[in-house]
Amino acid sequence: MYTPERERDLIELTRRILKDLDQIRRSDLKKAQEYAPLLREVIRYHDYKYYIQASPVISDYEYDQIFRTLRDLESKYPQIVTPDSPTQRVASEITGSFPEVSHYTPMLSLDNAYTEEELRDFDRRVREATGLETVEYSVEPKYDGAGIALVYRDDIFVRGATRGDGETGEDITNNLRTIKTIPLRADFSKFGIRLIEIRGEVLISREEFRRMNEERMEEGLTPFANPRNAAAGSLRLQNPAEVAKRRLEAVVYQVSYVEPEDMYPETHYEAVRMLHSLGFKTPFKDMKLCRGIDEVIAYCKEWEEKRDTYPYEIDGMVVKVNVRKYYDTLGFTSHHPRWAIAFKFKARQATTKLVSVVFQVGRVGTVTPVGKLEPVQIGGVTVSSVSLFNEDFIKEKDIRIGDLVLVERAGDVIPYVVEVIKEARDGDETPIEFPENCPSCGSKLVKLPGEVAWRCINIACPDQVVLRLRHWGSREAMDIRGLGEATAKALYSKGFVKDVGDLYYLKVTDLVKLPGFAEKAALNLYNAIQESKNRGLDRVIYGLGIRYVGLTTAKKLAQEIDSIWDLKDMPIEKIVRIEGIGDIVARSIKEFFSREENLKVIEKLEKAGVKLTRTKLEKEGPLKGKVFVFTGTLRCCSRERAGQIVEILGGTFANTVTSKTTYLVVGEDPGRTKLTRAKQLGVKTISEEEFLDMIRDYVNLEDLRRSERREGSLF
């Protein structure tokens, strides 16, 4: 449809328009007549890239700004509106992979607001049209997933479709039937409803998204850019059995059509409550009825602050007039309903230029290319670096120095190159050359069979030693306060430490020789190192930095052994029988314990008095078999410290409420998500005092309250 030359021209035109948006919006009629055709052409091109090719070349925010500029011009000068303007229709995403079906009512987009002023302007228009002095709004999270429409006839799920062009979508019923959060039968008949169409989104949770990407990277596959892309791509798989493996979820949030018509709930809130009562996954628990726009704004701001604590990616809040009878009064445009608007959070995507690439050595020797970017604001954070993962990732995306790239930053996910804007290339871009030797020690890099990454296998590589020291001292491992990367570098460069075992033979007189270390700082670090000797077997295993062994795996290993030396002699067949440990992880563990230099480090730790065994209390303690999750602020200690106590007493400490959770311990100002999840799963909630009653016979509570770092004196 577009030649490479034309695409390059349109990319350049897009960049010029984005720079001149304010000037364009202030255009007189003559200038508006000149700009409008250019805006329309650019929008059509980006619709094509996004919906047809599924390879956007600008961020959603940038697209919205261009679209709104055209809409504003056409609103200011109605005489320039054309029948084929993008503002007069909803863009299409039909791929032809599935049969097409018509929606009962159009699936329109939502108008967007990015500021408090724009929300107030929306409220003003609603009040003027309805004559209401104060409007009741329903406000709910705006999920960042793949839109769907579900049809139930006589209580049976009969059809599911994608959004498509708003009028027509693709029939993906068989794929949607594999999603367990979509009931195959729902008792709509008890509400007098024979036929209903409901709207929602297919999602992948943050936790599941991380798991999927870890598996893909272990298999040498390119990770998904974000949960939305992963969900949308999964829905288009032709084999429903493959779709089922993706662990998709569906959230429904709108009743769009009902027969008989008079059975439609009177308010949006009641409609969602009905869906919730019938067993659908809905935003009902996170919805709020707001009296007036001030309450709406406050709720939107509250959610923007806590968006990253939500189990799913959300990119804003949806604000809807709650009472349905006003919908006809307010009406629709060809693009969106006038009774709803989306308040969008700060953008998480932006386009920028890849300036250079540097290569970093990780603590297990993996060499990772890191792209240096022209700094760009994404979600309120300045991003200037992005991981390029490995050589295969660079080749697959054909990333070159000088490229214009679309970068995304989502939640706690590191900045990621979503797409290379190849259409913007001018010929000056240069391929990325992978080094043959380690950038830290100069050793020859190797690529082991079945792996995608280049690695330095020199155990004495300076960068690796420093990172292993920092990892050992991290909060999740041995929690040695003061042992950051700068201190680790200083210890190594002074020749005081060559591995983590050497830390426990340091003296205060050694530490005062470090740059910036006075006697007090040296004494504090010395004491922190000594206190870390009793952290526990699972944290030692994690701290050793065994490849593929994260904190969860370390805990599972610790529960299966009495001493760390058991792992040296444990057959690989027995390791793979431990829940959650596969062949790759098991082989990595065996390889670690087969290397003489690693065994010497463990011997150093043992001689220094570091705890490398499980006590009888840990194996047969009063909390054995019980899983604890904490929410809110505890008065006795931090949640991490409480979790350590649970593990020392034989229990399991987890961060997420699941069906395996025994107790959710509720402190002050608890998180809403964990409480809701616990209620849904029937998990018992207990107070902090009830938790302390369980442990008071084994823990010195006064010492715990006085100083949670005095671990040796608590039991």
Image (cartoon, rainbow, N blue to C red):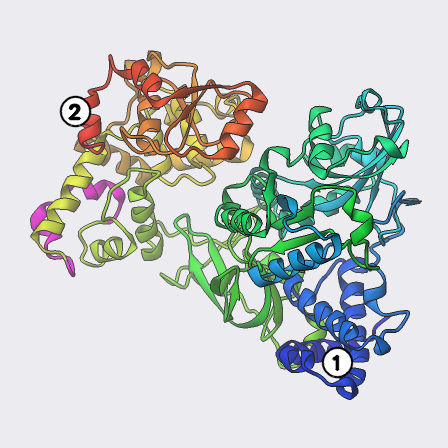
Q: Nearer the viewer, residue 509 or 220?
A: 509
Q: Quick one: label 2, few (<14), some, or many (20+) residues within 10 Å?
A: few
Query: In the figure, 648 relative to 165: above or below?
Result: above
Q: Residue at x 32, y 27 (%)?
A: 642
Work out whether residue 410 can be spotted.
Answer: yes
Task: Locate the N terminus and report the quarter of the image it occupies.
Answer: bottom right
Q: Which residues are magenta?
A: 498-516
Quadrant hosting residue 592: top left
Q: Nearer the viewer, residue 340 or 35?
A: 340
In reply to whether residue 500 is colored magenta, the answer given is yes
Quadrant hosting residue 84: bottom right
Percent across and percent down for residue 441 are: 36, 61
Q: CA separation, marks 1 and 2? A: 71 Å
Secondary structure category for the residue under label 1: helix
Name the mark on residue 320.
none
Query: In the figure, 139 relative to 40: above or below?
Result: above
Quadrant hosting residue 481: top left
In reply to whether residue 643 is colored magenta, the answer given is no
As shown in the figure, which amino acid type bears the numbered disc 2? Ser
Check disc 2 and report the residue beneath it.
Answer: 713
Q: Nearer the viewer, residue 575 or 638?
A: 638
As shown in the figure, which amino acid type bears the numbered disc 1? Asp
Q: Residue at x 50, y 22 (%)?
A: 578
Check disc 1 and report the residue beneath it.
Answer: 9
Q: Earlier in the sequence, mark 1 or mark 2?
A: 1
Secondary structure category for the residue under label 2: helix
On the picture, is 446 further left or further right than 18? left
Query: In the figure, 19 relative to 127: above or below?
Result: below
Percent across and percent down for residue 486 are: 26, 57
